[in-house]
Amino acid sequence: MSQRAMIALFTAAFLAATLLPAQSELGLAYLVAANPQDFFILIAVASLGNTLGSVVNWAIGLGAIRFARPADNSGQVSKWYQTAQGWYERYGYWSLLASWMPLIGDPVTLVAGVFKEPWWRFLMLVGLAKTARYVVVALLALQLV
C-alpha cells in the first residue's frame, strides 16, 4: 500500500466529513478490495480523517455562536436556532451517532458545536459512528473480491 494512497484516503475522508460535497466510501472500498491485507489500517486512516473532518464542523459551530447571535437586537431568537435547539434538546448528544449518515451527519456535528457539546463526548460518539460505517463498507468490499 503506497503512502500516497493512504494520504488520498485520509484527505477524501476528511473532506467528506466537512460541509463540502465529497465522498470517501468508494475510495475505501477500492483500496480494501485491492489490498485486503491492509483492512484494519485502511479503516483506521479513513475513520481518523472523517472524525477529524467532523471536528472542523464542531469547531465552526462552536465559533459560529459567537459571531452569529441566536437573537437579534430585539431579543427575538431566530427560527433556525429555535429549530436546532428543539431538535438537540430532544435527541441530545445521542444524535451524534447519526453523524455517519449522508446529508444528516454534517449538520449534526455542526449543531453539536453550536450547543457546546464537550469535545471528549463528541469525539467518542462521532468516532464510533464513523468507524462502524467504514467497517461495514470495508466488509462489503471484501465480499466483492
Image: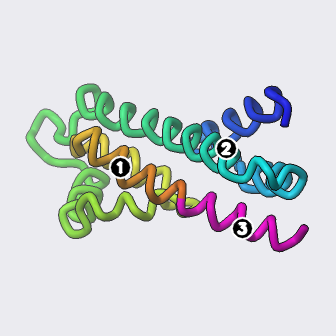
Q: Colour scheme used in the picture?
A: rainbow
Please state which of residues 139 and 80 is positioned toward the viewer in this rendering.
139
What element does badge 3 sit on?
A: helix
Residue 74, quarter of picture: top left
**Residue extending furthest front?**
37
Side of 78 where 14 appears, left or right: right
The kind of residue on which mark 1 rests is Met
Which quadrant of the figure contains the C terminus? Answer: bottom right
Instruction: Point out the tag, 2 or 3, that comes first from the N-terminus.
Output: 2
Q: Are marks 1 and 3 in contact (CB under 8 Å)?
A: no
Q: Which disc is residue 4 wearing?
A: none
Q: Which disc is residue 139 wearing?
A: 3
Provide the residue designation for mark 2.
41
What element does badge 2 sit on?
A: helix
Q: CA distance from mark 2 to mark 3?
A: 13 Å
- Image location (x, y in percent) of residue 116: 22, 41
Side of 99 where 4 appears, left or right: right
Side of 99 where 5 appears, left or right: right
Please state which of residues 141 and 100 is positioned toward the viewer in this rendering.
141
Residue 2, quarter of picture: top right
- Image location (x, y in percent) of residue 127: 45, 50
What element does badge 1 sit on?
A: helix
**How many other residues sit within 10 Å of disc 2, few (<14), some (14-19) or many (≥20)?**
few
Instruction: Point out the tag, 1 or 3, that comes first from the N-terminus.
Output: 1
Q: CA distance from mark 1 to mark 3?
A: 22 Å
Instruction: Point out the tag, 2 or 1, that comes first from the N-terminus.
Output: 2
Q: Is residue 138 above or below residue 10?
A: below
The kind of residue on which mark 2 rests is Ile
**Residue extending furthest left?**
75
Residues rendered magenta in the picture:
132-145
